[in-house]
Image (cartoon, rainbow, N blue to C red):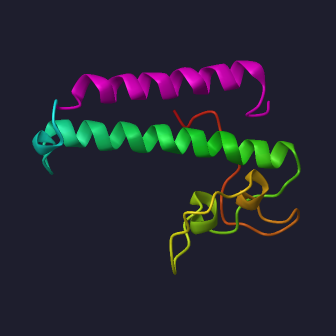
Amino acid sequence: MSVLDEPVLAERTMAVQRRLARVGERLPPSPAYLQPATDASDVVVLHLWRATQIVIDIAMGACLAFRLGTPATYAARSGVSSRQASSTPRSPTAWCAPPGSVTSWPTPTSRWT
């Protein structure tokens, strides 16, 4: 079963929506109240991070399904350069390594929710 199969994509979408709803429930009314090492900051960071991982997982699955390859490094996977951040928008295919390249990243799994 591919990450782009309708039931899997629906489950992933619902997981992202649940995580974003949890962020909305715990987000303080002002950034000044979002302090490190508090329950609110822990919940917000955890659920935003997990939602981001799910979306990256879907993107990785799309790269594999369309035979675009997969990113070779985490920096390539997240679109961040280790030398400098670019404000120039990247094309979707720029996120993927050439087909057949070796990566250390696992293939998408449905257990990342």
Give the image location of residue 6, x and y in percent: 75, 20
Res 39 → quadrant: top left
Residue drawn 64% across and 57% down? 89
- Closer-to-camera residue (5/95): 95
- Closer-to-camera residue (36/85): 85
Q: Is residue 90 magenta?
A: no
Give the image location of residue 63, x and y in percent: 78, 49
The image shows residue 84, relative to residue 56, as above or below, that is below
Res 8 → quadrant: top right
- Closer-to-camera residue (85/97): 85
User: What is the tally of numbered marks visible in this picture?
Assistant: 0
- Closer-to-camera residue (41/33): 33
Res 61 → quadrant: top right
Give the image location of residue 20, x and y in percent: 40, 28
* 9 horizontally vs 22: left or right: right
The magenta stretch is 1-28
Q: Residue furthest bottom?
A: 83
Residue drawn 55% across and 63% down? 87
Residue drawn 50% across and 29% down? 16
Q: Is residue 108 visible?
A: no
**Quarter of the image that includes the N terminus:** top right
Residue drawn 70% across and 62% down? 71
* 112 horizontally vs 92: left or right: left
Dominant secondary structure (helix, strand or loop) of the stretch shown in magenta: helix
* 58 horizontally vs 111: left or right: right
Q: Is residue 64 visible?
A: yes
Give the image location of residue 53, x and y in percent: 52, 44
